[in-house]
Image: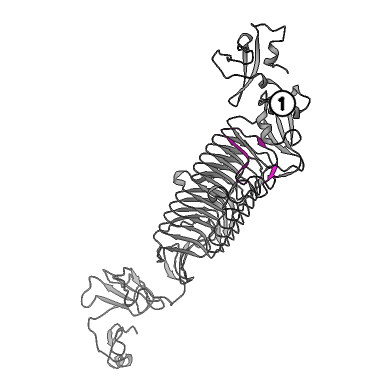
Amino acid sequence: MAGVTRISQLVTLASVTLTDVLPIVSRSSGALATYQVPVSTLLSPGGESVVKTVNGLPGPAVQIGDLTTVQDYATVAEAIAYAVSAGTMVGSTEDLTINVPSDCATLQIALDRIYALAPDVSITLNIEAGHAPAVGVSLSGSDYGAFTITSDAAIVTVDSSFPTSASFVFGENTRLPTLGTVVDMNGRGYTGYYARLNSRGYILPGCGIKNLGQLGAFGISSPGVFANINSSIHGFEAVITGNPRNVWISRASNFDGEGGTYTSATGDHAFYASRNCNLHIPASDIRYAANEAVVLRRSKAVLDACDLSEAGTTGLTVELASQGSMVSRGGVLPKVNNCGVDGIVVQQGSTFNFQDGEITGNVRDGISLEQSTLFAAVSAVVTGNGRYGATSRGSSGLTLNDSVVTSNVTNIFVAEGGIITLANTDIGSGVRTETANGSRYRETLEVYPGVSTGYGRFIVETSTGDQGGMEYSTTDAEVRFVTANTRKLRILDNGRVRPEVDDNYQLGAADRRWSNTYSDRFSPGPGNVFITAGTATPEGVVAARVGSVYLRENGTALSALYVKVSGATSTGWSAFQGTFPGPFADDAAASVGGVSTGQAYYRTADNVVVVKVT
């Protein structure tokens, strides 16, 4: 045994004196430590225990058997049998493989009776082909990091008698043994791999837990992997599938499982993180959850490039972020497609940031924001969702850059003070705003299209399909207004306002009149003549066509009104003479009555004043 002297040898080695200092390896309270101990302090009156540590302070006793090694025996099975019979532990100075059940009946016995005598010693607990474990492992207060559980077969299936309330591996205040195989729980057990109360665990790539029992305590779905109360589990490319909950982390715990397979959860959630936890599972497959794929409550997650599609209800729920919930930015949005209810639900003050990805074909909403949440996305594709592509309610804010939100029943829905900001984003048609009681309003909606080509659209759609809103054309540099699904009005880049079609719309109504209209000139009819005003004679100053009218603000009874009677230049204006001949029934009667050019008369047939221009 290189570098280590067993206490049982001290009294027989002639070369050892009481003044020598020897290295002694001790295991006490679950911790391994090496002490440089003077021989004179090693022996109690009975000669069987160490009573002092290297610093001279009283320490825990080390029984002689504690330092008996596996290498002292012909087989591993003999060493373990000795440890069991003596009620002690056997250390190993070399890497070791223990076959279960050939060398040791259960994993628990091996972990209770064998330990590594040096930090670089590895102990493999190998489950032999054909063996179906009937009991799991329960550990407390020690470091079992030297152990790795493996198997001859690719998958180990537990026995049908495995207790429904037990874990395959449970550790409290412990470093758990590494899981190096796939364990099929065969519908049994409460948890698969459970780290609790300041514990740490590791799952090797391609390894994990599957097919756990349906319900645990209090009717809660049982987790294949569970980290609870300041614990952490690392499982790069782990395989944790077909469990009621594939992974559950709670109370300041962490799970790091990048590139893993977490499909086909059978219970309420594939992933559930609550109470200030951190979930890091980028590039993972979390499809086919029976209900929700990922739920975050007061927790944070990195879900870059994950696939949360085909969930029975909602792909991703983020809530209670006022106490910490957030899906972090900087990576690729998970795919959240074809879920039974919603793609992504963010609520209760949570935040969600991502870039790239798909939220398509969900039965109800693609993105749903509620209760003062924030959601920002770049290059997202939100299409083909059964109700809303994206909805923002309850003072929530949605920002979409360089994204596509089209071909949903309603692309954008905003209510109860929600805000949506769009930049370079195609939202097609189908936008609604409404209050909780169904009345429509627009004042809570802020939309800022920022397109570089074509046109940006903000179209509001009612529940009956009627559309209205505005478009901005970058080609023509003009704004177009839409009502009843039709463009009605344009504002051109030169400031001109005109209707979409000629001679079809009116300004005001008989019971909705403008109180006043301010204009330099007014051109009725085809627009060839106009009415204008000024403070001097128009003759030689104002160019107009015959029939135009000029109102002189400082005119007299003979010069307050001018009518253009000839030419198309600034000459040919005639001042109205101040008297109205007539009235006349019609124009023919006026001609007979001697009305001359430039005079006005009252026509009784249709109650209008007529100015004769020729």
Q: 596 and 489: which one is in front?
A: 489
Q: 245 and 398: which one is in front?
A: 245
Q: Position of residue 332 (x, y in %)?
A: 59, 48
Q: 241 and 395: which one is in front?
A: 241
Q: Residues within 10 Å of mark 1 (few under 14, many from 20)?
A: some
Total residue callouts: 1
205 relative to 408 in the view: left or right? right
Q: Is residue 550 above or below residue 593?
A: above
Q: Is residue 37 above or below residue 565?
A: above
Q: Amino acid at mark 1?
A: Tyr
* Stretch in magenta: 162-185
Q: Which secondary structure lies at badge 1? A: helix
Q: Position of residue 339 (x, y in %)?
A: 59, 58
Tell me the quadrant of the picture where the C terminus can be found.
bottom left
User: Residue at (20%, 77%) from the top-left corner?
Assistant: 557
Tell me the residue that label 1 is attached to. 82
- Residue 64 figure quarter: top right
The reply to whether the magenta stretch includes residue 166 is yes
Q: Is residue 206 visible?
A: no
Residue found farthest to the right: 74
The reply to whether the magenta stretch includes residue 98 is no
